Image (cartoon, rainbow, N blue to C red):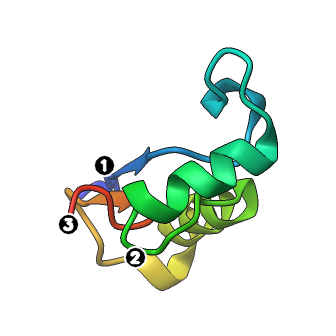
Amino acid sequence: HQGIRINAVSPGTCAAPMSLRPGESEADRAERAKTENPLGRVAEAEEVAAAVLYLASPAAGAVVGTDLVIDSGSSA
């Protein structure tokens, strides 16, 4: 009743340096993702940011208690 909404965004592997294994290149990571993720790719930072912006927007005004998982289908 106070207009407070609590939600979460849980990103999986994203196209960022921290998702690279030691000695792995971005091309290597892309190949690895083809076999590890149902979508066959890692998420882009813009995709995670879009989820955060949605949850913070008036369009999600009735969304409460949601964990929006952005992991290219890894946890599906």
Q: Which residue is mark 1?
A: 6
The label nearer to you, 3 versus 2, is: 3
* Residue 49 visible somewhere in the drawing: yes
Residue under label 3: 76
Q: Secondary structure at mark 2?
A: loop
Q: Earlier in the sequence, mark 1 or mark 3?
A: 1
Residue 71 seen in render: no
Crowd rating for badge 2 (residues with CA inside 10 Å; few <14, some 14–19, many 20+): few
Identified by mark 3, the residue type is Ala
Quadrant position of the N terminus in the picture: bottom left
Task: Say what amino acid the circle numbered 2 marks.
Answer: Gly
Comparing 75 with 33, the one in front is 33
Give how far apart the Cα atoms at labels 1 and 3 are. Answer: 23 Å
Dots 1 and 2: beta carbons under 8 Å? no
As drawn, is 47 to the left or to the right of 34? right
Quarter placement of the C terminus: bottom left
Is residue 73 depicted above or below 69 in this figure? below
Q: Is residue 35 left or right of residue 58?
A: left
Q: What amino acid type is highlighted by mark number 1?
A: Ile
- Which residue occupies 53% across, 78% down? 58
Quadrant in the rendering for residue 68: bottom left
Q: Secondary structure at mark 3?
A: loop
For disc 2, the marked residue is 61
